[in-house]
Image (cartoon, rainbow, N blue to C red):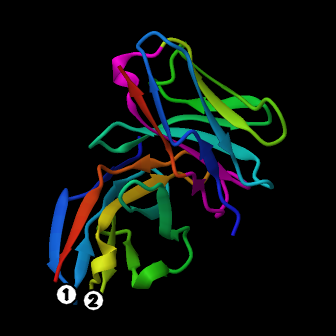
Amino acid sequence: AQSVTQLGSHVSVSEGALVLLRCNYSSSVPPYLFWYVQYPNQGLQLLLKYTSAATLVKGINGFEAEFKKSETSFHLTKPSAHMRDAAEYFCAVSEPNTDKLIFGTGTRLQVFP
Amino acid sequence: EPEVTQTPSHQVTQMGQEVILRCVPISNHLYFYWYRQILGQKVEFLVSFYNNEISEKSEIFDDQFSVERPDGSNFTLKIRSTKLEDSAMYFCASIRLAGSTDTQYFGPGTRLTVL
């Protein structure tokens, strides 16, 4: 069965600092991987996705993630945090032949001035 | 940019009452989903729907739940007799083609409060 583990339910960084949100997956077949962001009282917005093309995926708002098969990881990074990045971030996985998303427990990112 | 819409944004109901949550998926999308997020917990898959049939459902989606596409635009989730533990944010999502590299788009959610 597929699963996603997000290490760290809360991450705090200073404005301008590197953001690193960790995601590890478990899948019996090559997965599709996603990062979604949820701003307070809003729905889920897709940041980026990996669908077996380039292993380094660039998304919106300056975020990127690298698929590392050897480490079963898909960590999300941003070189310089901004106050507006404060939100909940969810990693998700799906098998290429299925259509449902399996989400991790989420990481709340706080950005301090 | 086209978007998934959901109504109402917030629904308060008494335990045992029926509720219907409504969604309008993106117009050229063919696959539809409901997810829920209990406060403070992760987003969980409930059901997927294609060609007027349920294609997959989770163990959460028991006989109290049903989905329907009553016309060409709406996609509804009905809870027949609500329980306190049904209180959650319910998200509708749609995708043009499942099993592809297309993106699943989410609506803003309906917050259901069962008293």
Residue at point 38%, 77% (across, down): A66
- Say which quadrant the C terminus of chain B sits in: top left
Q: Which mark is residue B69?
A: none
The answer to whether residue A31 of the structure is visible from this angle is no
Give residue B76's position: percent from left, percent from top: 66, 32
Residue A106 vs residue B52: left or right?
left
Which residue occupies the extreme right position in the image?
B72
Which residues are drawn in magenta? B82-107
| Residue that label 1 marks | A17
Residue B88 located within the stretch drawn in magenta: yes
| Residue that label 2 marks | A80
Residue B85 vs residue B109: left or right?
left
Residue at point 41%, 40% (across, down): A1
Residue A48 vs residue B25: left or right?
left
Give the quarter of the image for residue B74. top right
Asked if badge 2 and badge 1 are on a common chain, one would say yes
Residue at point 39%, 16% (across, down): B83
- The chain that hosts pointer 1 is A
**Element on which disc 2 rests:** loop
Marks 2/1 in contact by CB < 8 Å: the verdict is yes
Q: State the CA–CA distance, disc 2 to disc 1.
A: 5 Å
Give residue B100's position: percent from left, percent from top: 67, 59
Give the quarter of the image for residue A38. bottom left
- Mark 1: few, some, or many residues within 10 Å (few <14, many ≥20)? some
Residue at point 22%, 85% (across, down): A18
Q: Tell me the amino acid under the disc marked 1.
A: Ala
**Element on which disc 1 rests:** loop
